[in-house]
Amino acid sequence: MPCMLIDPSAKYRPYVPLKIDNRQWPTKTFSKPPIWLSTDLRDGNQALANPMTGDQKLTFFRLLLRCGFKEIEIAYPAASDTDFNFVRSLIENNEIPDDVWIQVLTPAREDLIRRTFEAVKGAKNVIIHMYNATCPMFRNVVFRNDQAQTVKLAVTHTQLVRELADKYSAEHNMKIRYEYSPETFSQTEIEFSLEICEAVKKTWGKAGLGDERIIFNLPATVEIAPPNHYADQIEYFGTHISEREKVVISLHPHNDRGTGIAAAELACLAGADRVEGCLFGNGERTGNVDIVNLALNLYTQGIAPQLDFSDIQSIIEIVTQCNDLPVHPRHPYGGELVFTAFSGSHQDAIKKGFEDQNIRHEKAAAAGEAQIWDMPYLPIDPLDLGCNYEAVIRVNSQSGKGGIAYIVKQNLHLDLPRKMQMVFYQVIQEISDREAREVTVDDITTAFRKTYHFGGPKYEGRLALRNFRITTEGSGDLPNGVGGDETPPDERRRFDGTVVVDGVLRVIRGDGNGPISSLLDALRKHLDIQLSLREYTEHTIGFDQGARAAAYIELVPLSPDVKDERRAAQSWWGVGLDSDIAAAGLRAVLSAANNAIGDRALPELKLSVGFDTSSGQSDVSDAIVNSLNLTLPRRLQASFFEVVQRATHASGGQISYEDLTKLFQTTYGYEVAEKARISLESFTIEPIGSDGGRRFNGNLLVDGEARKVAGEGNGPLSSALAALHTMIEGTLSIREYSEHSVGAGSEVKAVSFVELLYEVNGKKESAWGLGSDTDITASGLRGVMRSASSLPVVLKAA
Ligand SMILES: CC(=O)SCCNC(=O)CCNC(=O)[C@H](O)C(C)(C)COP(=O)(O)OP(=O)(O)OC[C@H]1O[C@@H](n2cnc3c(N)ncnc32)[C@H](O)[C@@H]1OP(=O)(O)O
Ligand SMILES: CC(C)C(=O)C(=O)O
């Protein structure tokens, strides 16, 4: 089986370097772009397994115009009807802008030259491009010509081109220029290249300045030497051709050694004026030189290339559709992976680079200076090519914390503290190792939300903040916007808040020297969550009205010794986002606390009875709001607080929230199964008289016995009281009444809060009762009966 030779010199010979003294190009630098010629529709097209259709060529042509090409080789018209007709259709359909030169290629053959001229008849600006091979191998093998015959071939056919150019330009008002290519220039003896070009120039006979210049296109038809050799050849040609000012030196590099770009760049430094190539380097074998690459190389040197690749992805789409060839994912500037870093150290550098650059750019903008792009690993700003930063960092098992933090910042606008980055990195590493695949942006943001219970109800943990109030001892409510734990020394803060604990609303309270420490205190007291704050950072997101605060918190196990807390190996991070900075901190505490408690069962929530009367009362009523959705009238709050205090003393100083709720329900008869002493079985209310009076007819159950009663008043409640008076000693009167609705839609019901005053034998007593019903009148009546049942009403003898 053939294989690589141990001594390849037995088979291959090296190129022969040019002897040039004092070459100039190595010290030259770029200052302007060359003239570009796209040969996608000719050299690119002829290299395709399936050359482009007319429609594809038209699409491609329009794309080239969009990119800004002013010279476009559109066909080898003599090759096929498709090519010929395409040229005709562009001309006849006025597709060619006035400032664009179309170029067509022809061999040095009379019939084909004539057909080529026929193809371009009537076009405004045309470059006729003729070629014949000039290097020894082609002379000897392909044409079997010596040097003189080769020159003769070129000269004779240049003569024909000249005659036809004169004729067509006169007859069809065309501007016609001439390009001659000594094909395989790079393999041709340099002196012979000069000789044949001098002969062609002379024959053409009308090389002038500007648009009159003759174009000598010097192809590296096959790249057989390093790029410096091509540069030498070009410099030599340019410094030895006569009337240099009347000559455009054009490059046509191929990429057989993979150095087409370097060859073109060095040859430009060596004096070339023009480059022929294809978008993304399509073309024979390894392709023509890639004009996108060349142009953007200039761009990254701060030189406007005069070509526009602002929407590079849409350009790739069209090019790949027309060529039916892919663009490699690693292709310079355009490949789908070229702005992507997977590896940790690259990602870290890019992330830091962006941060540093933002600061630099802000300063430069303020000073009115240029905002220079200077980024690790990214030689060009993806935005300039219509790409975004989304794909700049992608994560797999080679990635590090910096990259992951970058994605979190880009997508969630959260700038994680370094230690938190390290912790979250472990989470993503675990996913990436487990799944053995790239971790997507969605994977990362979802993992972040889940890990830190961040981003709304869907991601809530076992503990979630509903509402809160921070008060300063003696000074009432704190205005929102008091941040972190920045409390003046000696001022104490109190956190009163409603927190969802395992799905149940709870009111908790704690004290500390700031909002965070008072919430931590509340968690300790009420839920036995013993944590302490080790690190807190915050930043704002957005501006002005839309600004929000992001807070990051690290909690450690509470320890009697602060030093132990600082050294604690175990810690939990949390994040909170809110328009109010204090709320952001509190959310961050709960986010971290969620991670700290994991699945651990929490103790039954305890309501401490050590509160002072007023604040204990609001705790109690908050609890009823939370558990039963009932907003108690103020006097009922006071009344119930007394009940609670008695109950908590009786049960050793503490009462659970469940028991508190039950106590409320049984005390006031709210939604309990047992019948009260006096209960309403059924009733009717009838209007009486003309002044709005009412008559109540009720079926009651009193001490287990059915009673029918009736009474009249000026409303349902007063008529019910009148009815009760028919069976009791003393009098009942309404001391306070209020009601509100609970629930929504078809579930809505009325809840009535009734306080009755009972006067009998000179004694007075009052009691509260609750009624509820979908009918508001029935709700009020039930409240009356429930309140009466709580009073020691004396029944009349039957
Ligand atoms: C480096 C380059 O890219 S050069 C451009 C190459 N592009 C193409 O070839 C695509 C279009 N070509 C074609 O469609 C056909 O080759 C045609 C129509 C031009 C000619 O087709 P044919 O007449 O069948 O000739 P064929 O394709 O075999 O070409 C070889 C002949 O042309 C001669 N020839 C090759 N190049 C040239 C040239 N630049 N000038 C004159 N004659 C040439 C060869 O010596 C050979 O002649 P021979 O038949 O006397 O031996
Ligand atoms: C016709 C010439 C310019 C050519 O395509 C080449 O040499 O590659």
Image: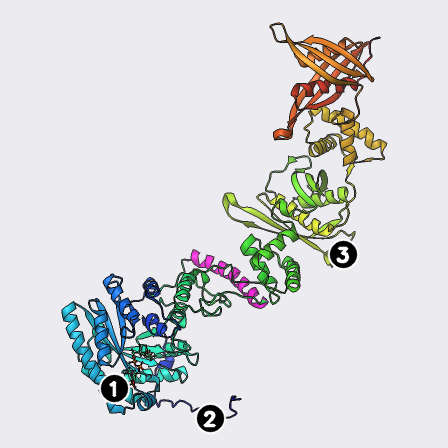
Which dot marks residue 576?
Answer: none
Residue 346 inside the magenta-drawn segment: yes
The disc, 2 or 3, on the residue closer to the chain's N-terminal end is 2
Q: Is residue 159 visible?
A: yes
Identify the secondary structure beneath mark 1.
helix
Which dot marks residue 196?
Answer: 1
Q: Nearer the viewer, mark 1 or mark 3?
A: 1
In front of the other: 392 or 557? 392
Question: Which amino acid, by three-letter code, is at mark 2?
Answer: Ser
Q: Position of residue 748 (x, y in %)?
A: 64, 28
Q: Is residue 289 left or right of residue 356?
A: left
Above/below status of 559 relative to 157: above
Q: Residue at x 27, y 91 (%)?
A: 147
Question: Which amino acid, by three-letter code, is at mark 3?
Answer: Asp
In front of the other: 378 or 360? 378
Identify the secondary structure beneath mark 3.
helix
Q: Position of residue 588 (x, y in %)?
A: 65, 48
Q: Is residue 779 left or right of residue 644?
A: left
Q: Residue tagged by mark 3?
A: 564
Colour approach in the figure: rainbow
Q: Residue at x 55, y 54 (%)?
A: 411
Q: Position of residue 659 (x, y in %)?
A: 79, 34
Q: Residue tagged by mark 2?
A: 9
Most common secondary structure along the magenta stretch? helix
Ligand 2 within 8 A of label 3's CB?
no
User: For the residues marked 2 and 3, what is the alpha-carbon distance in whole angstroms?
Assistant: 73 Å
The disc, 1 or 2, on the residue closer to the chain's N-terminal end is 2
